[in-house]
Image: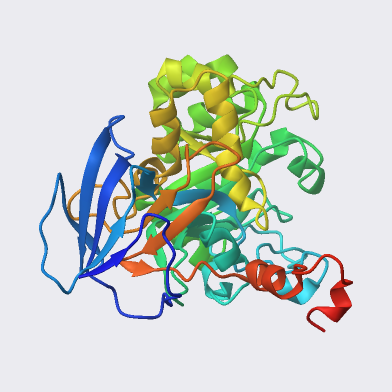
Amino acid sequence: MKRLLSSIVLTALSLNAAAQDLLITNATLHTGENGEVIESADILIKDGEIEKISARIRTNESITVVDAAGRHVTPAFFAGATVTGLSEVGAVRETVDSEYEDLFTDIMHPEFDIRPAYNPHTSVIPITRVEGFGYSLLTATRGDRSISGQGGLVRFDGGYDSFEGKPVIFVEVSGHAAGKTGGSRAVHWMLLKQAFGELQKGVELDLLSPIGRDQLRNATKSGVFVFNTNRATDIMQVIKFAKTHNIEAVIHGGREAWLVADALAQANVPVMLNALENLPADFDSLAARLDNAALLHKAGVTLMFTSGETHNARKVRQVAGSAVANGLPLEAAIAALTSVPAEVFGARPRAARRGAIADLVIWSGDPVEVTTLAQLVIMGGKIDSMESRQTKLRDRYLPIDPALPRAYLKP
């Protein structure tokens, strides 16, 4: 059998290659489910899925073996809410497809779906993937309406149609977004109530197009609504609105969520937050604090993490590490980074268990420690080359002989 040594030195393999049968041996496996950690675990991968998790799995001579040498292994991480594949260079307009503005209509457009604009060839995907991240929430960002549009989960496997899960409608109810919507967050709620009123039989307010009305109606039945807001009073309005219209709601932001943790838990409304946000950056987040995640978890709120960035989505590990340093249990953080987002948004299970997709990462140390590196990434049973635009630039220009200027090394 082909055995990859514990140093995990690999021949570069492309994710476009066929899925391999692999055996990962001697892993410290964080399953991402029920706080479970399996010591000295062997993980057998067949046809892109986890076939078996046990101790000392025997295989035939043809299978590739990866010796984890006791290292931590997790499912590939969730990169948070990003515009990966929708924004290559923020200052270059033709590379930004995550929002709409100035459509010269007075209606909202929940039918604005950003997924057809997704570019799987963006340099951002391999940069993020080699850091241990396997999927993200593709996000319609703030436009000039309360409803920003719709998106969903996308898997970082380089495919053109790598979307999963339920349709996700993105809604702005923050004070910042109100500047483009009548100047008051009360206008957000006025328009949203009118828009949902159109879904009632016999009510025609013409705030939605016929297609938008159908899309919004379908989302209320089988989709998820992500509300972008930080202020506790706004979060309470989201809870009330979600209950009134019987919709699945998620809070994105939630800097003051700890103030209403019990209400969020009772209403079963998850929160996607950046645990590094600990200062009152604006008047919507005066009560921000570092132990926000820990307080929410203690109250029973479902947690996910985001960094608020696309080109540095890998900072989500640091976000989770900060939450752990401030009281969140490690395995709760691992779940928030792996299985929970898939469950919330209706995708394939991401916990490391039999039958799950084999998106796995071998880490050099504690997965949420900032100095830890992803040493090997496996997506659907395919070993990643661990190359990105950044690693290629590093290899090309990093000085070999410091006695010589860089220009003399690799012109």
Tell me if 1 is positioned left or right of 332 in this view: left
Q: Please say whether residue 193 is visible from this viewpoint.
A: no
Where is residue 29? Give x, y as percent: 30, 41
Tell me if 74 is positioned left or right of 142 in this view: left
Q: Is residue 227 above or below residue 86?
A: above
Q: Residue at x 64, y 35 (%)?
A: 229
Where is residue 17? Give x, y as percent: 36, 80
Q: Please say whether residue 98 is visible from this viewpoint.
A: yes
| Number of marks in picture | 0
Q: Is residue 92 above or below residue 307?
A: below
Give 13 or 182, whichever is nearer the viewer.
Answer: 13
Position of the N terminus, as image quadrant, is bottom left
Q: In this view, does 302 lie above or below 192?
A: above
Q: Which residue is drawn at 37% across and 64% down?
A: 379
The quadrant in which residue 286 appears is top right
Give 231 or 297, whichever is nearer the viewer.
Answer: 297
Q: Which residue lies furthest to the bottom in this view?
A: 411
The quadrant in which residue 183 appears is top right
Tell me if 58 is positioned left or right of 117 in this view: left
Give 353 or 115, whichever is nearer the viewer.
Answer: 353
Where is residue 367? Give x, y as percent: 47, 40
Tell me if 352 is positioned left or right of 361 in this view: left
Q: Residue at x 40, y 51 (%)?
A: 362
Position of the C terminus, as image quadrant, is bottom right
Give 110 or 409, whichever is nearer the viewer.
Answer: 409
Q: In this view, does 210 lie above or below 200?
A: below
Where is residue 244? Give x, y as percent: 44, 32
- Looking at the picture, the colour scheme in use is rainbow
